[in-house]
Image (cartoon, rainbow, N blue to C red):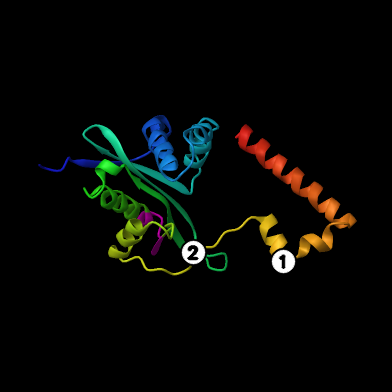
Amino acid sequence: MSRPAISVKRVREDEQRPFTELWMSARVEAGVSPEVAARAASEGRVAAALGREDVRAYVAMADGRAVGFAVAATSPFSALTEAPCVTIDQLYVVPEARKHGVARQLMSAVTVYADSRGCEQIGCNVPAQHREANRFFARLGFSSQVVRRITTVSALRRRLGTDEQRTHSLEALLHRRRSLRARAAQSANRLAG
């Protein structure tokens, strides 16, 4: 059985539907409920991301259907360097199309994008628990450079013991009010954008 011909094209504003459907599938496969994924798409999260100048998305097609996507963004490698770097934020291939060269084709498109932006480095975000994805990137020459750890603000505050110190103070009350206002403003901006 021969492999289907794979074509990769940039996702344009008028061609977002196949990409959005794949993005929702990737979110569901990652453990997000279908309802939450659909709500995020309907709220314009995909359109907002694709509308940014520093973000580029590609969709891979095989036999007339979308089978994978890559999302890359250009930014400095770190806050203290000015050298631009393309970071692959997401790379996804539908399960039945994996191990057929789809991801390699998407990576080729990202490489051309990095060249066009004058970037000497390409980075990627790969969840530590995804062994196959880590192997794929390692085979392409990506090495582990940093480990990115994430926590919530409230969890860190508890661990640092600052919750107890600020519980009864006026400063704590003002801080909570500012945090609530900032979150409300972010939510309003997401809904408006």
In the rendered image, residue 81, in percent from the top left (x then y), is placed at 53, 68
Crowd rating for badge 2 (residues with CA inside 10 Å; few <14, some 14–19, many 20+)? some
Q: Residue furthest left?
A: 1
Which of the 4 image quadrants contains residue 19?
Answer: top left
The answer to whether residue 39 is above or below residue 1 is above
From the image, tell me which residue sits under label 1: 160
Q: Amino acid at mark 1?
A: Leu
Q: Earlier in the sequence, mark 2 or mark 1?
A: 2
Q: Which residue is mark 2?
A: 77
On whether residue 120 falls in the magenta region, the answer is yes
Q: Per the image, is 159 magenta? A: no
Label 2 to label 1: alpha-carbon separation: 29 Å
Query: Up-down: is 107 above or below 121?
Result: above
Q: Secondary structure at mark 1?
A: helix
Q: Is residue 84 left or right of residue 105?
A: right
Q: Secondary structure at mark 2?
A: loop
Q: Nearer the viewer, residue 31 or 84?
A: 31
Q: Position of residue 107 (x, y in %)?
A: 31, 53
Q: Identify the image quadrant of the N terminus.
A: top left
* Residue interval drawn in magenta: 114-123
- Tell me which amino acid carries mark 2: Phe
